[in-house]
Amino acid sequence: MSLPKTMKAVRVYGVRDYRLEEVPVPTPGPGEVLVKVLASGICASDVKTYLGARVWGSAEIAPYIQVPVTPGHEFVGEVVALGEGAAEKYGLQVGDWAVSEQIVPCWKCRFCQRGQYWMCQRHDIYGFIKDRAEGSWAEYMRFPANAINHQVPREIPAEQAALIEPMACAIHAVERGNIQLGDTVVIAGMGPIGLGMVAVARRKSPGLLIALDMKPHRLQLALEMGADLAIDVSQGDAIQRVLDLTEGYGCDVYIEATGAGPAVGQGLQMIRRLGTFVEFSVHAGPVAVDWSIIGDQKELNIHGSHLGPYAYPLAIEYLRKGIIQGAKLVTHVLPLERFEEALEIAHSGEESVKVILKP
């Protein structure tokens, strides 16, 4: 296959300084994979980075973000070239569809050596590290030699296959909740990942699965994805409703996926003693809570949830089988050239769930 020498790519230079440029098409080295990007999603963290919110601890473009860089970590691509040894290493051939896990581990640090690669000390995330982990808002992208790659069945439409990364995150967060049969589970935030969490949590056979949000169209989707009850937190006292539904005890598991600070305090009030709180969101800034609730008052289990380790094969299978209804999550598909409009649609969230870019 003859490849072009240059391609269109979005490049990050600073807060709201994103430019569509013509750049060289990457050349895959040993163990590397080159894909033609078929579809790429816009994540809430992409929006926060674009707007200059405090993502990864910075008031502007975080030190974690090495500019200029091509953003994008939710994607699927068609393999167009393989570096030496890559075909054997990943079981991929030219023409296959593939996804790469959002972190490119170093495989040398303490965490990688222990199999905890998603907490890699170097922490190269696609779309944030120039040269080493360039992202998917481009016509082509390179999977580095250290990447973790998976083949994607072509029966999953490309727009839905771009959901594999966020759905892997949803699966990991639900696993962190350690949901038991009959539990009352509350998931706050019905964005794409929160909705995926609902679909996955449903398979854990909770006694009552409750979705929280403020947008009616997303609450309706939550019911369609498997929630027993959808509560608009802007209409009345959601905490009291959950307490009333649980004989005053509170929910067994609370998963925070809103990215809004008040949802953290809400969860601490809503959860029962000895319950499990899962914090998934990337917040725009520090969130203050009463830590005495966590210890002295309730002795809670507080679990973080980061990325989607070991969950990609299951995310692919759930999308393929329709257990996660990808078609309901993808609401907008725009060409790469309209990335700024796509970011604004994703930021508003008034009518959107997942916004997809297609080169």
Image: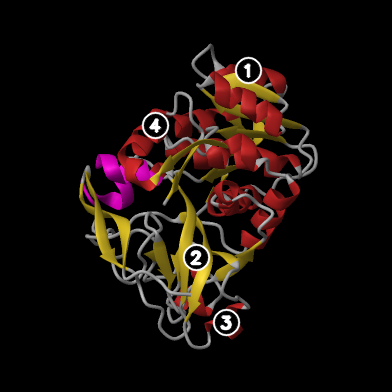
Query: Would you name the residue on which mark 3 appears?
Result: 87
Q: Position of residue 117 (x, y in %)?
A: 51, 70
Tell which tag, 2 or 4, sits nearer the viewer. Answer: 4
Amino acid of disc 4: Ile
For the point 38% across and 60% down, the residue is 135
The residue that appears at 58% across and 37% down in the rendered structure is 329
Return the disc, 1 or 2, that comes first in the chain's sequence.
Answer: 2
Sooner in the amino-acid sequence: mark 4 or mark 3 = 3
Can residue 53 be seen here? The reply is no
Q: CA distance from mark 3 to mark 2?
A: 24 Å
Q: Is residue 56 magenta?
A: yes
Amino acid type assigned to the residue bearing label 1 in the image:
Arg
Q: Residue at x 80, y 42 (%)?
A: 181
The residue indicated by pointer 2 is 118
Q: Which residue is mark 1?
A: 241
Provide the residue span drawn in magenta.
Answer: 45-61
| Marks 4 & 1, CB-CB < 8 Å contact | no
Q: Which-is-in-front pick, marks 3 and 2?
A: 3
Q: Is tag 4's residue or tag 1's residue first in the polypeptide sequence?
A: 1
Q: Tell me the distance, in whole angstroms, between the alpha carbons under discs 1 and 2.
A: 37 Å
Please determine whether, in this image, residue 199 is positioned above or below residue 81.
Answer: above
What kind of element bears circle 2? helix
Task: First in sequence, mark 3 or 2: give its number.
Answer: 3
Can you tell which mark lies on residue 345?
4
Q: Cβ–Cβ below 8 Å for labels 2 and 4?
A: no
Mark 4 → mark 1, Cα distance in angstroms: 32 Å
Q: CA distance from mark 3 to mark 1?
A: 54 Å
Q: Position of residue 128 (x, y in %)?
A: 33, 59
